[in-house]
Amino acid sequence: MGSVYVYVCGGLSAIGNVFWGVLFGYDIGVISGILTMPYFRKEFPSGPAKEGSIVASLLAGCFFGALAAGYLSDRIGRKYSVLVGSVVFVVGGILQASSTTFAQMYTGRVIAGLAVGELSMIVPLYQSEISPKEIRGRLVSLQQWSITIGIAISFWIDYATLQIDSPQQWRIPLWIQIVPAIILVIGTFFLPFSPRWLVDHDRDEEAITVLANLRSKGDRNATVVQEEYREIKENVTFEREIAAKSYWELLKVGPENIRRRVLLGVFIQAFQQLTGINAIMYYAPQIFSNAGLADNSSRLLATGVNGLVNMLATIPAIIWIDRLGRKPTLISGGLLMGSSMIIIGSILATHGTKYFDESLGKHFVYLDNKGSSYAVIVFIYVFVASFAYSWGPTGWIYPAEIFPLRIRGKAMSVTTACNWLFNFVIGLVVPILLDSIIWGTYLIFGIFCVLMAAAIYIFYPETKGKSLEEMDNLFGNVQKSKNLEKNEGELEAA
C-alpha cells in the first residue's frame, strides 16, 4: 500500500507534467503544428525570425519562472507552488487561445512560460523528495513520460484540427491545453506535503504521518519510517547551521563541493537542450518537409508518429533507470543521438538540393530519391527514441537528487533556469539555421551529443541507489558524515 501511494502521489504530481506536458510538452507539439496551419499564417503572417520569437517567448517566461521557483518552493512549499503554477498557466492559456494580435500572443506565452518554468523545477524536486531511493529514478522518469504523452496528444490534435476550415483550426488546440491545468488545480489538494520540507519548517508530526502513508501503510512506528525521519531530521539540523542565505553561496568552495554540484547540474541541463531534441519537436513539420514529405497533412501525420515514438521509448527508462544507472543511460543515449544527427546531416548534404518556397518564405531541401527520404525519417525517429530513454528523463533526475536540502530549492531553480535559457536560444536560432545552413544544423547537434557523452563519462559520478541524504558522502563531505554519525550515536545512547 505504501509503495502504491508513492506512485499515486507521483502520478498526481506527474499530471503536473502532463499539464507541464500541456505547457511545455503539449506546447512544443501544438506550436510546431500551429505555425504551419493556413488560418494561423493568415492571421499571424511570419517568417523564420518571427516564428522563432513566437516559440522563444514562452521559453523566456520559463527562464524567469524557474528562477522564482526556488524562493517560492522554500517559502510556501512544493505542494502550493504547484497550485500557483497551475493557476498562472490558465491565465496564459486563455490569452493565447483568444489572441488577435502578436502582442497578446506574446503576452500569453510569456505568462504561460512563467508557469511552465516554475513547474519544471518544482515537480521533479517534489517527486524526488517523496520517493524512496530504490524507485526515485523511476518515479521522476514518470515526469518525462507524462511530457511525451502531452507531446503525442498535441501532435494528433493538430493533425485532426487541420481539417477544420476556420480560425478554430488553431484556436481549439490552444483551448484544450487549459483542461489539464484545471485538473491539476483540483488534484493538488490531494497531494501530501514534502516530508523534507515539513521537517525543515518544524512540522515534524505531519512529516512522520506523510512518511507513514508513503512507506508503511500508515504505521507511524514502523522501522523504515522512523529511520528515514531520523535521517531527514539529522540532515536538516546540520544544514540549518550552514543554511544558504543567498544564491551567491552556490558558488562557494567547501567540503560539500556545492559549486561542483551546481556546475554538474547546470551543464547536464544545458546538454539536454544541446542534443537538439526541441529543435526536432518545435519544427518537426519543417524537418519532415526536408525529409521529402511535400503536403502539410503528411508532415503532421509523420509528426504524430514522432510523438508516439517519443512516448513509447520513454517506457524503458521508467522500468530500468534504477537498475542500469544514470551514467550508462546518458552515455549510450548521447552516442546514439550523435550518430543519428550526423547521418541525417550527411544524407541531406550529399543527396539534397536547396530551394526556396515562396508561399512559406523559407528554404528547404529536396532529396533526389525516396531511399534518402525514408532514411532521414527513420533516423529522426531513432534520434527521438534515443533521447526519450536517456537524456529526456535522466536530465531531470540527476539535478533533482544531488543537492543537500539547505540549497536544494535555490540550486534546482538555477539549473532549471539554465535549461530554459538554452531552450530559449535553441527555439530562437534553429528556424534561422534551418533556413540558412539546413543540413549543417544537424551536424552541429550531432557533435554536441558526442561531446556530452564524453563529459558524462569523465566528470559525472553515479548516483543510482543513493538516498538524498547520502549524496554528501558521494561528493566528499566527510565532515558532515562524521557529524551525522555522532548525532546518530548520541540519539541511540539516549
Image (cartoon, rainbow, N blue to C red):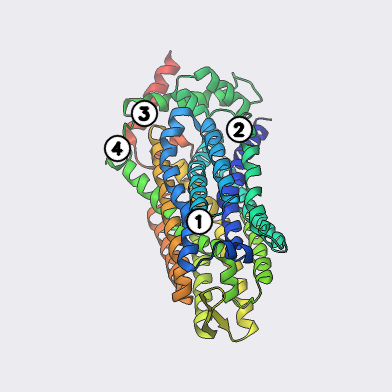
Nearer the camera: disc 3 or disc 1: 1
- Inspect the image, locate mark 4, and give the three-letter code of the amino acid beneath it: Glu
Nearer the camera: disc 1 or disc 4: 1
Compute the Cα span from label 1 to label 2. 33 Å
Where does label 2 land, which residue?
188
Tell me where residue 473 appears, x and y as whole percent: 39, 38
Residue 154 against residue 339 in the figure, above or below = above
Left or right? Give the position of 126 relative to 245: right
Residue at disc 1, secondary structure: helix
Choose the circle earlier in sequence order: 2 or 3: 2
Where does label 4 land, which residue?
249
Q: Residues within 10 Å of mark 3 (few under 14, many from 20)?
A: some
The answer to whether residue 143 is seen in the rendering is no
Q: Residues within 10 Å of mark 2 (few under 14, many from 20)?
A: many
Tell me where residue 474 appears, x and y as whole percent: 40, 42
Using the image as rendered, state which of residue 22 and residue 464 is in the foreground: 22
Tell me where residue 240 appears, x and y as whole percent: 36, 25
- Inspect the image, locate mark 1, and give the three-letter code of the amino acid beneath it: Phe
Mark drawn on residue 102? 1
Report if the CB atoms under discs 1 and 2 are less than 8 Å apart.
Answer: no
Where does label 3 land, which residue?
239
In the picture, the quarter occupied by the C terminus is: top left
Choose the circle earlier in sequence order: 3 or 1: 1
Q: Residues within 10 Å of mark 1 (few under 14, many from 20)?
A: some
